[in-house]
Image: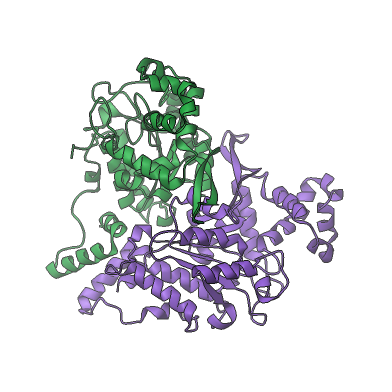
Chain colours: A purple, B green
Amino acid sequence: MRSDFYSIARFSALEAFVAFAMLAALSLPAVAEMPATDALASWNEGPAKQAIVDFVKATTDQSSPNFVPPEERLATFDQDGTLWVEHPMYSQVVYCLDRVPALVKAKPELANVEPFKTVMSGDREAVAKLTTHDLEKILFATLTGMTVNVFSEEAAKWIAAAKDTRWKRPYTELTYQPMQEVLSYLRANGFKTYIVTGGGQDFVRVYSQRVYGIPPEQVVGTAAGTTYSYDADGKPILTKDPKLLLNDNDAGKPEGIHLMIGRRPYAAFGNSTGDQQMLEYTGAGDGLRLKMLVLHDDAEREYAYGPAQGLPDTKVGTFTQALYDEAKRDGWTVISMKNDWKTIFPAAH
Amino acid sequence: MRSDFYSIARFSALEAFVAFAMLAALSLPAVAEMPATDALASWNEGPAKQAIVDFVKATTDQSSPNFVPPEERLATFDQDGTLWVEHPMYSQVVYCLDRVPALVKAKPELANVEPFKTVMSGDREAVAKLTTHDLEKILFATLTGMTVNVFSEEAAKWIAAAKDTRWKRPYTELTYQPMQEVLSYLRANGFKTYIVTGGGQDFVRVYSQRVYGIPPEQVVGTAAGTTYSYDADGKPILTKDPKLLLNDNDAGKPEGIHLMIGRRPYAAFGNSTGDQQMLEYTGAGDGLRLKMLVLHDDAEREYAYGPAQGLPDTKVGTFTQALYDEAKRDGWTVISMKNDWKTIFPAAH
């Protein structure tokens, strides 16, 4: 009952009132009969699903030694490769590449400057070979320099239209259904869910509510500074600076969590070495903590990559053997996409 | 009813359930009879109280053109001089000065180095004359270099014991009762309340829940970076760096709001030039926005200071004539402590 009521209370006080009024009128028992595990319908029975259910039971049962007061229930999720597809390229990088023509139109002098010249050539193989340093140049050029409002509008327009080339579906439909269920299940049990992403904070905030039910203020990500000034009409504006404030990867994740949230998560989910420190930091807290890593081992339904499976390392989502060993040693749970998930994506709309 | 139920729902789903079960059992109407304005019992009738009530009505009434969906209801409050006493010295500065003896004990070489030497001398007049640069040295030396856990423990111990010299009461009891009522009233109407303070984010987070009912993740403040590392036992730690990430004053307030929250407030409360840009930024949004400034014009019950009243400028809470003029021009509401507030502080425990 507790979990069901929580889920109601989060959404609408009015709905909750109506629900209780109806229960009272019908003299029905307030306790829902559905087993809590149905909340994870896309998960196969196994240690991963069990770890989630056991954690929620232990932290929400007042008689449990691991009970966590509702206000401290906090769960953090990496995004790329943990909540949605990151392969073969982070969707935000695709966004930045897609922005280059407009950028060159506004600043024609960039047409003959690398790496913009390569992007404008349309040569996909050459683009795929761009160095990290080249990509950073493109990211700064396409993610900064405009007001935060203009950026949000451009990003919203793109995310509404852009599609993944393999599935021909919007990126926002390529979230992992089993992870969506974990988000909902945790929230239904009083947990505040956060995204803690190496991706751009402003970018993810554009769609986080719609796609994950996570409001902008619960998105922590890589962040550039802004500068406050006034436009020609004297109206206040915030302009995105090419100055990195928070690199929300690796050690930057616990540092970002401390900066933006100020307390330690009870549960953390990731899929790569970029999440290692977030899971370590989560695990270093008192009591029961849930630490989970998504392993991309499903070449058929999604992708299989990373040294932990003897597969080549890639630019994205590196799941190394060392990370795998740390997970085993410290009691983190590895989620096998292939074995633990009945379905990968939500049904098409 | 709406507002009352919201206030219940925020605290405990279980309590809410019990409350409704009782209402149903007793066949009482669920609609509370108390007028909404009773929530502001410490406010005299007048334009300031009216502005708050009108704003809440307009933003929560679904038939109003200024209705704001619950998830977008966001209100930001400066702390020092807006929610509690800031005169004659910010309590966090008192904390830092109080920490100097322990600092000098740990680093004896500082005993003969200024400004630590002056602080150790106990000469209050000399301490009062320290420059901003001197104070910064003291702040960095006493607020950084330790783990975030050690800092929180030290700050919590101090805030539990330290007392204001004039009222002989803990600083945490010198919050403004009328502003506590505004916080509760807004929350009861579905607003998420944030502190946006020039003070240290980590410092205010130590007591924000207990003192204001505001959780740590809803405190935005001046923030130093942290560094993630491992202690001698291999346990992850976060150490506070002497590196300023966010100076949450002046333009830093809207910049901090964008960084930490990611959306524009519908209501903002301040008391000095340090809050000017936050109120401008709030006012620049669409629809109805509430912008309020607390004027310290009550020398008897609290303090009267600031050029706007022809009084000398001070190091804290500068309410200039220019700010007063901007408030009048742009429809901000000035709260007179003397005329608008029936009481200043909550009753002693």
Residue B176: image quadrant is top left
Q: In this view, does A334 lie above or below A105?
A: below
Q: Against B32, is B313 above or below?
A: above
Q: Where is residue A318 in the image (x, y as percent from the top left)?
A: 66, 66
Residue positioned 32% across, 62% down in the render: A13
Rendered location of residue B116, percent (x, y): 45, 24
Q: Nearer the viewer, residue B319 or A299?
A: A299
Residue B82, placed above or below residue B152: above
The picture quadrant where one finds residue B312 is: top left
Residue B276: tell me if it is visible: no
The image shows residue A128, relative to residue B3, as above or below, that is below
Image quarter hosting the C terminus of chain A: bottom right
**Could you tell me residue A337's position as x and y percent?**
58, 78
Q: Position of residue A138 (x, y in %)?
A: 74, 52
- In the current view of this chain or complex, which residue is farthest to the left? B26
Q: In this orientation, does residue B36 appear?
A: yes
Q: Nearer the viewer, residue A104 or B239?
A: B239
Image quarter where the N terminus of chain A lies is bottom left
Residue nearest the observer in this picture, A44 or B95: B95
